[in-house]
Image (spheres, rainbow, N blue to C red):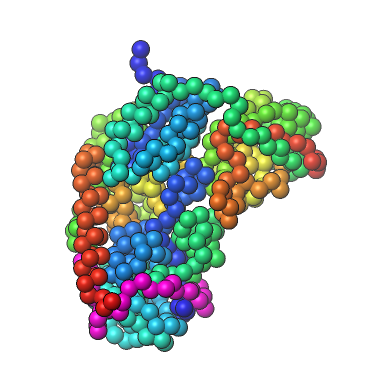
Amino acid sequence: MIEILSSGALNTVQDRGRRGLLSSGVSRSGAMDIQALDAANALLGNAADAAAIEVAAFPFRLRFASATMVAVTGALAEVRLSGRRLPPWWATEAEVGDELTIAPPTVGARVYVAVGGGVDVPELLGARATELKSGYGGHEGRGLRRGDRLPVGERLSGALPEGGIGGLPPPGRDRSDEPLRVLPAAEWPDFSEEARRLFATTNWRVTAEADRQGCRLDGPELVRERRRELLSHGIVPGTVQVPPAGRPIVQLAEANTCGGYPKIATVIETDLWRLGQAMPGDDLRFVVVGRSEALEALREVAEWLDRLRGAAALYRVS
Amino acid sequence: MADDFTLSQAGTGALLLDVAMGDAFDDGRQARLLALAANLDGVEGVEDIVPGMNNLMVVFDPLLVDAGEIERRLAQGWAGAVAADEAGREHEIAVVYGGADLQEMAAHLGLAVADVVERHSAAVYKVAAVGAMPGFPYLSGLDPTLAMPRRAVPRQGVPKGAVIIGGGQAGIMPITAPSGWHILGHTGFVLFDPHRATPATLKPGDRVRFTVAGVEP
């Protein structure tokens, strides 16, 4: 059991989200930085679909009411376990009564706290992810509050060595100014040549209207040359819509499953973490890539995760 | 002859087939799309088949199945798609009509409230697609004389069970959420229950009739 000592409404239980239910109007939800979640679970030898806590409101404090393993990944922040400072992307054993505290991040926006065996809230529609917008899943369909007690699943792996183990973040993490890779989407040809050039060369500013549903960007107006009304259509997280005002919105984990705005591009899944870790006022850029490059990026991340999982297993005592 | 569809990428793991002819929704093309959707069910690597309004999004695992293969299936499948005969189920949904929007709508359309209720409950609607919100049905078949432009500013909390009209479409709110559509009345009919294995009650291809359970001032 874990007991939440201080939290904000934006801190939620998340896993890899719900797949295959867009056709029922059910958003994917899940972690905004899937790779950080995956790394935390890999360090602990958890199942890939284990749930963790996504921390987006700081400072965050919790107490372990039972002994467990804990891994902390994602944004860079000062993390302490009963006073002991933990390095970034680190996993260690936690004793009964240990307190974990996480200060506001210095780089990034969201920190992931995983425990051995995962946060064991009931599964709903095939996942444990909280859907904040519609109020279901996770812990009572809402953000975590002081006094909440979360059950911990059965750990699947042996103990971590004294002091703990660290994991190497996925490729590209250290280059925070890398552009987000996108594939052109349905209405790409409808935009003027100038709009397409601006889209790929502008330093887009993340506005305060950024949450788990989507992220509104500020910059020059993107003009559509061919204006036509679109009927409602399915959209996926990563879709870059351009409403009539001409400033893009990137749809994210809790995006509505259908939209009606023109879509200029789609951020590839591998790079969605950059939006999950973006703060209002940050700048970001887009670069248009081809299908094969996007696939190569997916494979690279899958290989990184395999390596991390394998390396972590060598250190755990079984 | 030019193709009567467009195919586009929606990221690495999704493709969008758009068969809309201009901005008017077409029931016949939708029926063919739903037949195509049923045919794609069970294809290896496909994880979600999402009908929209005269379009279809297919979500797949690009490491399991090649996008080109899905493109080929969509293009060939659309060319050969034939609408199935009245495939879906029929639902009767009891509505208590009433409220400020209903009065306003009647005034805007130059109709008596009783006429609006009559025309809304006389039609047989088709569930064209489900989405945007959990379990939200896009209903086609609204009497064109009841079409109402959406509100300029959406309302923040349109309640669950509200029976609504937006443009030429009809709908029902599955959960309390923001919406710019007009409210004609309310129903207790459950559209979405996350505790069911199939959370959405209505499916594309189903038919809906509204019955008058009451008219309140």
In the displayed structure, B17 sits above or below A50; it is above
Q: Is residue A73 visible?
A: no
In terms of image quadrants, where is residue B118?
Answer: top right
Residue at 38 percent across and 73 percent down: it is: A155
Residue at 74 percent across and 41 percent down: it is: B95
Q: Is residue B197 visible?
A: yes
Span colored in magenta:
A145-168
Query: Residue B170 at what x, y percent from top left?
Result: 62, 35
Placement of the C terminus of chain A among the 4 image quadrants: bottom left
Query: Residue B207 at what x, y percent from top left?
Result: 64, 32
Residue at 66 percent across and 26 percent down: it is: B143
Report the side of B56 relative to A224 (left or right). right
Query: Residue A76 at what x, y percent from top left?
Result: 27, 69
Residue at 50 percent across and 30 percent down: it is: B34
Report the side of A298 relative to A263 (left or right). left
In the displayed structure, B158 sits above or below A156; it is above
